[in-house]
């Protein structure tokens, strides 16, 4: 007990185990909470991801955006204005005539989440998946899908993040039903879409039929990554799909 | 000491996991209740009509104006539900006695062609289910709508290709047949007399859905029209690898907090318990 070094050492060992662990845990929690508090959108992003990854079954999971906002409600089901004859298209005199020419999409803007990007052209990758845009900050239109404004789904994909930070579709999860999405074509025409739903799916159970399958009217699908990131294969496990119809 | 340490770690773990549990309970939203419909005038002896859809409550929705025989309107979105389809003589108000009316139950997420068809006393309304299921790879799906009264029962097939209809009666439609994408010479023949009614080149794209419509031609004869029911991608790539991971959280810290307020409160709770633990530990040390 006369050894002055003993007591502090003793105190260290007696106190350090729980204290160090606890302090470490607290620091982690604090740092994370400060991060989330400062970056509210991050919470949203992971909320979309989490509801899919939290379900142990691989089945498709409809996820809502922030729970306070009922997704897939009002805007999609807005009753037709009773007096408007534009609700139903003017009957075409020549039903067999092809759809009017619509330009190749060149630019995408989503004011609600600050997206304004030129569009690349995407083909099929060698493994049958959708080719990813070459640039992190640029979205791409799948050339095998409908042109925006033509009957059928037009498919546009963009990265959620690069290797170092947010990419063009980082805030895609923040879209709500009713938000506007504008696609500009090379011929200076613009097609406006209205968001219906956001859903994330495990990549190995991707709903190809729902995303690429036939639709009678012009629709739009925006695709990015979501869910957990596999740091070994450098892949996100889920895809977030935003579905919209032409306004 | 060890117990306390485990307790601390456990508490911290709970703090990380609990919000994820809360979030996962934040349920799925119901899908939108919207159907897609178009009106079609396929009755050769019916004059020009205006079409309306009357919901159970509320005023009638206009579904087509000045539609003559052979007119197929464009698709429109409409809240799913039960409607009365009403065809009135063109220019007459929706409330006048209809030339034809029938009930259509429209389900969300599906597409329909509402057709007035037949002649004379055989005139009736049809609710045709427009199939939106994806065709097989590099294939289209095609059905026949037989609206030519002069052709009677018909056989319709692609030359050296699939059969669309056998012995199909006037004022009826077939189900969808799978047709390889490409251009086909489509022929319709009377099934009784084998006389060729019409022969026409038809191009279908993979991934899309079509109706071939047979119509009377004024003054005699039959014509064939190709209608696009729905368009889809011929090739359907699966998922997309659209992320570099630069904003990903390393597991197991991927848990999602429900609110930052919740985090702050939980953090305070943890800090308080830590303080308590430390104090207790110190006191105990002093005791020894």
Image (cartoon, grey):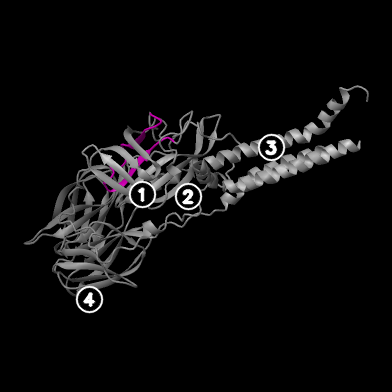
> Are dots 3 and 4 in contact, CB under 8 Å?
no
B199 with respect to A110 (left or right): left
Report the magenta stretch's main SS: loop
Q: Residue at x 53, y 54 (%)?
A: B27
Q: Could you tell me how far apart the alpha carbons at marks 2 and 4 are, in whole angstroms? A: 43 Å
Q: Could you tell me how far apart the alpha carbons at marks 2 and 1 are, in whole angstroms? A: 15 Å
Q: Residue at x 88, y 23 (%)?
A: A4
The residue identified by callout 1 is A244
> In x, y percent, where is residue B280?
82, 41
Say if residue A237 shows up in the picture: yes
Q: Nearer the viewer, residue B80 or B5?
A: B5
Q: Looking at the image, is B113 positioned above or below residue A47?
A: below
Q: Looking at the image, is B149 positioned above or below residue B10?
A: below
The residue identified by callout 4 is B95
Quadrant showing the C terminus of chain B? top right
Q: Could you tell me how far apart the alpha carbons at marks 1 and 4 are, in whole angstroms? A: 35 Å
Q: Nearer the viewer, residue A213 or A131?
A: A131
The residue identified by callout 2 is A65
B47 with respect to A140 (left or right): left
Q: Chain of mark 1?
A: A
Tag of residue A25: 3
Q: Quick one: label 1 or label 3, which is nearer the N terminus?
A: 3
Q: Residue A136 colored magenta? A: yes
Question: Is label 2 on the same chain as label 4?
Answer: no
In the image, which residues are magenta? A135-159
């Amino acid at each position: 007990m006369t050894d002055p070094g003993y007591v502090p050492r003793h105190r260290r060992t007696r106190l350090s185990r729980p204290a160090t662990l606890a302090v470490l845990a607290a620091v982690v929690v604090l740092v994370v909470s400060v991060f989330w508090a400062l970056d509210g959108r991050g919470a949203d992003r992971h909320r979309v991801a989490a509801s899919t990854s939290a379900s142990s079954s691989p089945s498709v999971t409809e996820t809502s955006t922030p729970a306070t906002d009922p997704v897939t409600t009002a805007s999609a089901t807005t009753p037709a204005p009773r007096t408007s004859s534009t609700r139903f298209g003017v009957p075409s005199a020549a039903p067999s005539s092809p759809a009017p020419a619509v330009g190749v999409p060149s630019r995408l803007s989503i004011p609600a989440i600050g997206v304004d990007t030129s569009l690349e052209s995407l083909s099929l990758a060698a493994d049958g998946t959708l080719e990813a845009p070459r640039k992190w900050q640029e979205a791409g239109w799948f050339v095998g899908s409908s042109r925006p404004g033509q009957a059928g789904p037009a498919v546009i994909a963009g990265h959620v993040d690069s290797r170092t930070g947010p990419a063009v579709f980082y805030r895609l999860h923040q879209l709500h039903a009713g938000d506007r999405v504008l696609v500009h074509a090379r011929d200076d025409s613009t097609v406006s879409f209205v968001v219906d739903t956001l859903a994330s799916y495990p990549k190995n159970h991707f709903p190809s039929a729902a995303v690429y399958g036939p639709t009678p009217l012009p629709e739009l699908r925006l695709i990015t990554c979501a869910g957990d990131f596999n740091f070994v294969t450098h892949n996100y496990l889920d895809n977030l799909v935003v579905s919209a119809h032409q306004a | 000491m060890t117990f306390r340490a485990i307790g601390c770690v456990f508490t911290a773990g709970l703090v990380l996991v609990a919000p994820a549990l809360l979030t996962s309970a934040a349920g799925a939203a119901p899908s939108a209740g919207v159907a897609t419909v178009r009106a079609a005038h396929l009755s050769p002896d019916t004059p020009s009509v205006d079409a309306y859809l009357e919901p159970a409550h509320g005023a009638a929705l206009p579904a087509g104006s000045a539609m003559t025989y052979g007119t197929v309107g464009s698709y429109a979105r409409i809240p799913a539900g039960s409607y009365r389809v009403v065809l009135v003589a063109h220019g007459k108000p929706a409330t006048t006695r209809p030339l034809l009316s029938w009930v259509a139950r429209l389900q969300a997420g599906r597409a329909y062609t509402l057709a007035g068809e037949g002649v004379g006393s055989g005139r009736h309304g049809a609710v045709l289910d427009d199939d939106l299921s994806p065709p097989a790879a590099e294939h289209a799906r095609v059905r026949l709508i037989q609206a030519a009264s002069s052709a009677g029962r018909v056989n319709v097939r692609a030359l050296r290709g699939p059969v669309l209809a056998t012995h199909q009666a006037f004022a009826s439609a077939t189900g969808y047949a799978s047709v390889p994408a490409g251009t086909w010479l489509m022929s319709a023949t009377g099934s009784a007399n084998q006389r060729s009614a019409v022969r026409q080149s038809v191009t279908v794209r993979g991934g899309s859905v079509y109706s071939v419509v047979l119509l009377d031609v004024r003054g005699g004869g039959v014509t064939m029209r190709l209608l696009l029911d729905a368009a889809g991608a011929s090739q359907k790539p699966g998922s997309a690898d659209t992320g570099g991971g630069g904003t990903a959280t390393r597991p197991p810290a991927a848990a999602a907090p429900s609110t930052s307020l919740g985090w702050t409160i939980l953090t305070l709770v943890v800090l308080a318990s830590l303080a308590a633990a430390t104090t207790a530990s110190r006191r105990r040390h002093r005791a020894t």
